[in-house]
Image (spheres, rainbow, N blue to C red):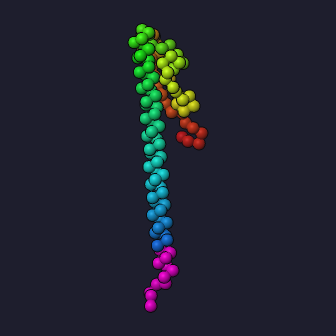
Amino acid sequence: MHLYPAKRRWMRTLLVSASVFFLVLLTVVFVLNQAERSVSEEQYAALENALRRAAVTCYALEGRYPPTLEYLTRQYGVVEEPGRYGVRYDIFAPNIMPDIEVYPIAEEGKE
């Protein structure tokens, strides 16, 4: 004779299994989200470094910094993604390093 019906043990096992499954699922989603954010930050940092290196290369070869961002990308092969990253390129004088800043552009539905 059992004190508790066998059906309740089955329900309890199912409830514990479902709870563990959802906890693991939430953990995986959280880790993937953090990894995606980290990769995105590294990508725009790499783009900023590439733009700076290309500007310095231009100065070394031509004796002046690139007058525009378009000139820099066209002549020195730096590829930017206009819909994904915004680039601020401010040049004061041809012999002064331009101020280069890369920032992510928020996609619709994401903040």
Q: Is residue 82 visible?
A: yes
The residue at the point 54 percent across, 29 percent down is 81
Horizontal and vertical percent for residue 43? 46, 33
Report the residue that reaches farthest toward the right.
108
Compared to residue 59, the image places residue 14 above or below, namely below
The residue at the point 47 percent across, 55 percent down is 26
Compared to residue 93, the image places residue 81 above or below, namely below
The residue at the point 53 percent across, 18 percent down is 74
- Does the stretch in magenta take in 5? yes
The residue at the point 41 percent across, 16 percent down is 57
- Does the stretch in magenta take in 51? no
Start-end of magenta stretch: 1-12
Horizontal and vertical percent for residue 11? 50, 75
Compared to residue 4, the image places residue 104 above or below, namely above
Image quarter of the C terminus? top right
Image quarter of the N terminus? bottom left
Q: Is residue 90 visible?
A: no
Horizontal and vertical percent for residue 105? 54, 33
Report the residue that reaches farthest toward the top.
63
Q: Nearer the viewer, residue 23 or 39?
A: 39
Report the residue that reaches farthest toward the bottom.
1
Q: How many marks?
A: 0
Horizontal and vertical percent for residue 30? 46, 50
